[in-house]
């Protein structure tokens, strides 16, 4: 498999967008360039090995990648011309092959990226093209003449090349080139065409941005439901209170060991909710190394998790949990746990959680009364944005 650097060129001044730098305009809460970066990152392990973002000189990234980037992201500084910016990006890249993409095309599809990688070799570059659909005219002052559109195609990005050959081509022929393919062709190199995508349009004029926002909105609303999985395990030891689902179980001689109150049911539910919302788990949100959480009330941590999940535009649809414990017997306490958990998960819908207790049939640490485990599946549903709360 060839390894590609995905170079996103975000060096433009946005003169046709009323002076705004369009590469940083928000599209459904993410800067325009992030859309392409995330699409490229979805092919990490399938050919795309890093992202190189070319920014205007002195420009910081307004929205840095999350703490755990799915793929390395390098920043390169833009130059005076497009060719200079692309060259800087190519020189910062680490792999033999590159895809060069306009930050202003947020909707390049995964299938298109795969077609390009497939068509690219050491001797041949590859570009996406589409036949011209509209009738063409040449307008020069008052003179209008017809132009035959037969054989004419529009060119999109990403454009895909063998990096050393593209560097040479841009150094020799990059001046004034409208895209990398022009310099590549001027250098006499072979170029393959793959089918482009109509939705891979370039956000150039304010109306394009309106169209992009409508598309982004539709894409987001298509995801209406998601499921997450949560799991937790704690040791069962003497001289600790046993707290599950916010309920203190007074008749138990054993309790769960942990940094917080060790309420493993609350922990596993929190992780299932966070997983469904695509957020980091509770170990990341409330690190055990932070003294602030020593002895913490886990139901309060769960309340904070629900607040964050709602802030992302999700509501709890259903939570199903199973606690595995040999001792003590938990069945009598389940209704009270359900009541307390429901009040946090969705105060408006008291019946959104189901709890089960299983013995461990004498197997493993749980079966010997040395530990408890808990598994949770949580389903969230998306609420329309006007009902969403900000976090
Ligand atoms: Mg825990």
Image (cartoon, helix red, strand yellow):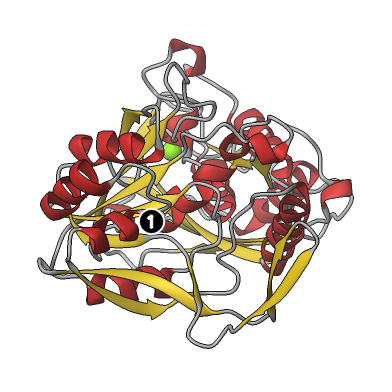
The kind of secondary structure element at disc 1 is: helix
Look at 26% across and 38% down and name the residue there.
87
Position in image of residue 126 (x %, y %)? 29, 70
In this rendering, the answer to whether 103 lies above or below 98 is above
In this rendering, the answer to whether 24 lies above or below 5 is above
Residue corresponding to mark 1: 40
Position in image of residue 89 (x %, y %)? 28, 38
Look at 39% across and 27% down and name the residue there.
80
> In which quarter of the view is residue 235 placed?
top left
Ligand 1 position by quadrant: top left
Judge whether residue 43 can be spotted in this image: no
Q: How many marks?
A: 1
Position in image of residue 104 (x %, y %)? 55, 49
Look at 82% across and 45% down and name the residue there.
388
* Viewport quadrant of the N terminus: bottom left
Judge whether residue 103 can be spotted in this image: yes
> In which quarter of the view is residue 145 placed?
bottom right
Closer-to-camera residue (308/156): 156
Closer-to-camera residue (249/133): 133
Ligand 1 within 8 A of label 1's CB? no
* Viewport quadrant of the C terminus: top right
Look at 59% across and 63% down and name the residue there.
201
In this rendering, the answer to whether 77 lies above or below 320 is above
Q: How many residues crowd around disc 1 within 10 Å: few (fewer than 14), some, or many (20 or more)?
A: many
Closer-to-camera residue (89/284): 89
Closer-to-camera residue (135/231): 135
Q: Is residue 63 left or right of residue 115?
A: right
Position in image of residue 389 (x %, y %)? 81, 38
């Amino acid at each position: 498999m060839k390894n590609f650097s995905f170079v996103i060129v975000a060096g433009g001044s946005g003169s046709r967008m009323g002076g705004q730098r369009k590469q940083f305009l928000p599209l459904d809460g993410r800067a325009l360039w992030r859309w392409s970066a995330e699409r490229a990152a979805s092919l990490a392990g399938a050919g795309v090995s890093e992202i190189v973002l070319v920014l205007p000189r002195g420009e910081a990234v307004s929205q840095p990648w999350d703490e755990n980037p799915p793929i390395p992201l390098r920043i390169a500084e833009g130059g005076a011309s497009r060719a200079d910016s692309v060259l800087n990006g190519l020189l910062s890249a680490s792999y033999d092959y590159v895809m060069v993409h306009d930050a202003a095309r947020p909707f390049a599809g995964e299938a298109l990226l795969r077609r390009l990688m497939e068509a690219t070799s050491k001797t041949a570059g590859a570009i996406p093209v589409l036949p011209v659909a509209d009738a063409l005219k040449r307008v020069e002052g008052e003179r209008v003449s017809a132009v035959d559109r037969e054989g004419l195609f529009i060119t999109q990005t990403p454009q895909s090349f063998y990096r050393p050959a593209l560097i040479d081509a841009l150094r020799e022929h990059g001046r004034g080139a409208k895209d990398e393919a022009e310099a590549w062709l001027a250098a006499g190199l072979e170029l393959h065409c793959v089918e482009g995508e109509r939705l891979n349009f370039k956000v150039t004029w304010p109306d394009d941005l309106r169209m992009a926002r409508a598309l982004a909105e539709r894409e987001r609303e298509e995801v209406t439901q998601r499921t997450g999985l949560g799991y937790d395990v704690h040791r069962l030891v003497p001289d600790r209170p046993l707290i599950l689902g916010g309920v203190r179980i007074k008749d138990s001689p054993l309790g769960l060991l942990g940094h917080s109150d060790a309420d493993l049911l609350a922990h596993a539910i929190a992780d299932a909710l966070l997983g469904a919302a695509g957020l980091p788990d509770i170990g990341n949100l409330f690190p055990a190394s932070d003294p602030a959480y020593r002895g913490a009330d886990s139901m309060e941590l769960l309340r904070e998790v629900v607040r964050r999940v709602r802030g992302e535009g999700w509501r709890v649809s259903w939570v199903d949990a199973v606690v595995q414990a040999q001792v003590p017997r938990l069945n009598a306490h389940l209704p009270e746990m359900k009541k307390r958990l429901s009040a946090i998960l969705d105060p408006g819908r008291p019946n959104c959680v189901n709890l089960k207790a299983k013995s461990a049939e004498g197997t493993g640490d749980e079966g010997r009364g040395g530990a408890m485990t808990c598994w949770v599946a949580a389903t969230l549903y998306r609420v329309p944005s006007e009902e969403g709360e900000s976090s």
